[in-house]
Image (cartoon, grey):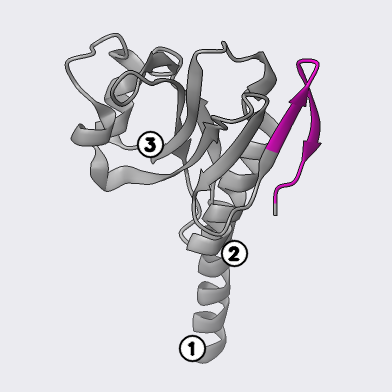
Amino acid sequence: MKTIQLLFMLTGLVLFSSCTKKTPKFIYLDKLSEKALFSGNTYGYSEVFLVENPPEDKAIRDSLKLNYFMKNRIDFCALDGDIQEYVMSFYEKTSCTSYYMDNEEDKRHLIAEDCEDYYMGMFYYERSKENPDIWTCTYPEGIIDTVYCVSQQVELDTIR
């Protein structure tokens, strides 16, 4: 009898814990997302997102970020001609990164330095120097994507 009660208690605990898992949520930090001088004299555009309730499994987390990126990335073809780089960065939502939700205008603090332990990755694209209508993903490794802009519209997107 005690074995059956213990089994029911464990089953209930497993069901309760699986029901309490929360869905991941992406939070856009608009004041940290902007056109800025990146390196040297190169302008870039950066978008920063917090991820609330990220999955623990790295493969699932990476897939979730890629899917979010593909659905929500900026229109490369609409970027100013002087922008040569684009970055979409992800950080886990914690007390450290949440500071930037309420104090985003405080440029004295850099999320990349202050909260580096909660960095979850990024997507990084560069505009071709030979043809400014072509953008290529250079990070993360393993992602192959080239965006071709023709008449200010994406003609072909080859993400793999």
Residue 120 as seen in the image, left or right of residue 57: left
Could you say which quadrant of the image residue 130 lies in? top right
* Mark 3 / mark 1, whichever is N-terminal: 1
Q: Is residue 77 visible?
A: yes
Density class for disc 2 (Cα within 10 Å; few <14, some 14-19, many ≥20) is: few
Which residues are drawn in magenta? 147-159
Q: Which residue is mark 3?
A: 93
**Residue flagged by tag 1: what amino acid is it?**
Lys
Q: Which residue is mark 1?
A: 2
Q: Is residue 149 magenta?
A: yes
Q: Give the Cα distance between marks 3 and 2.
A: 26 Å
**Residue in the image at 76% along x and 16% along y:** 152
Density class for disc 3 (Cα within 10 Å; few <14, some 14-19, many ≥20) is: many
Q: Is residue 154 magenta?
A: yes
* Mark 1 / mark 2, whichever is N-terminal: 1
Between 106 and 160, which is closer to the camera in this rendering? 160
Q: Residue furthest front?
A: 130
**Residue flagged by tag 2: what amino acid is it?**
Leu
Q: Are marks 3 and 2 in contact (CB under 8 Å)?
A: no
**Residue flagged by tag 3: what amino acid is it?**
Lys
**Residue in the image at 31% along x and 21% along y:** 100
Element under disc 1: helix
Residue 47 as seen in the image, left or right of residue 136: left
Q: Residue 42, image x and y in percent?
A: 38, 21
From this view, report whether residue 138 is shown above or below residue 72: below
Q: Residue 120, image x and y in percent?
A: 40, 47
Magenta region, main secondary structure:
strand
Density class for disc 1 (Cα within 10 Å; few <14, some 14-19, many ≥20) is: few
Mark in the foreground, 1 or 2: 2
Could you say which quadrant of the image residue 1 lies in? bottom right
Element under disc 3: loop
Q: Which residue is mark 2?
A: 15
